Amino acid sequence: MSSFKVFDEKSIQSLLDLPAVIRSVESAYKAKAENQAEVWPMIYRKLGQAADMDIRSGWMKNKKFFGCKILQWSGNNVTRKLPAVHAVLTIMDSETGEVKGILNASALTGYRTGAAGAVGSKFLANQDSQTLLIIGTGNEAPYQIMGQICVMPCLKKLLL
């Protein structure tokens, strides 16, 4: 097996640039629209009363890789002083099957979700909007706010 990179959460946070993530997410959406990418059906399972897990995967045909993210949410983790979400992402070469990278996807998940919201706003929102309303203040709210700031140049006021 060839060597591959492993990225922990701190590495991901120090390496990611949200405007670049937004461009990547936009590119992935475009690739999917052009049949150059696929998102496969999600697998979801409830794990007891306060936890669940899902497996999300897809294939970037045009870039010759696929990925699989396993994500677990635990509603009781706040009492354990742990994050509610833990995730790992494996990236593999779609022609050879070689593992290219393993990432702690907890931080990556927030960036990707914030970027997805930003792509939607870039194309659908009034670009002259000055006020941003965020409903809910979960783990992903800061990423949504950062994403909107990147694509909405006139924002002046934030409502939570």
Image (tube, rainbow, N blue to C red):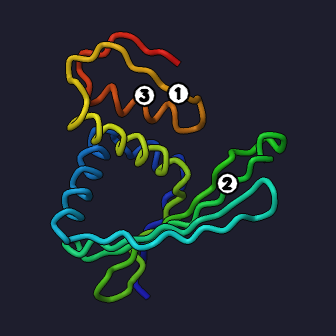
Residue occupied by mark 2 = 73
Amino acid type, callout 3: Ile
**Image location of residue 124, percent across then percent down:** 23, 35
Using the numbered discs, state the Cα–Cα distance from disc 1 to disc 3 in whole angstroms: 11 Å
Give x and y (percent) for residue 154.
24, 15
Q: Is residue 11 above or below residue 137?
A: below
Which tag is nearer the camera, tag 1 or tag 3? 1
Mark 3 → mark 2, Cα distance in angstroms = 22 Å
What is the secondary structure assignment of the residue under circle 2? strand
Residue sticking out furthest to the left: 34
Task: Say which element carries label 3.
Answer: helix
- Residue of label 1: 135
Residue contact between numbered discs 1 and 3, judged by CB atoms under 8 Å: no
Asked whether, in this view, residue 55 is left or right of residue 31, the answer is right
Residue tagged by mark 3?
145
Q: Residue 108, percent across and down?
A: 47, 51
**Which residue is drawn at the image coordinates 38% and 86% (left, top)?**
97
Amino acid tagged 1: Ile
Q: Residue furthest top?
A: 156
Residue 65 location, quadrant: bottom left
- The residue depicted at 48 percent of the width and 25 percent of the height is 134
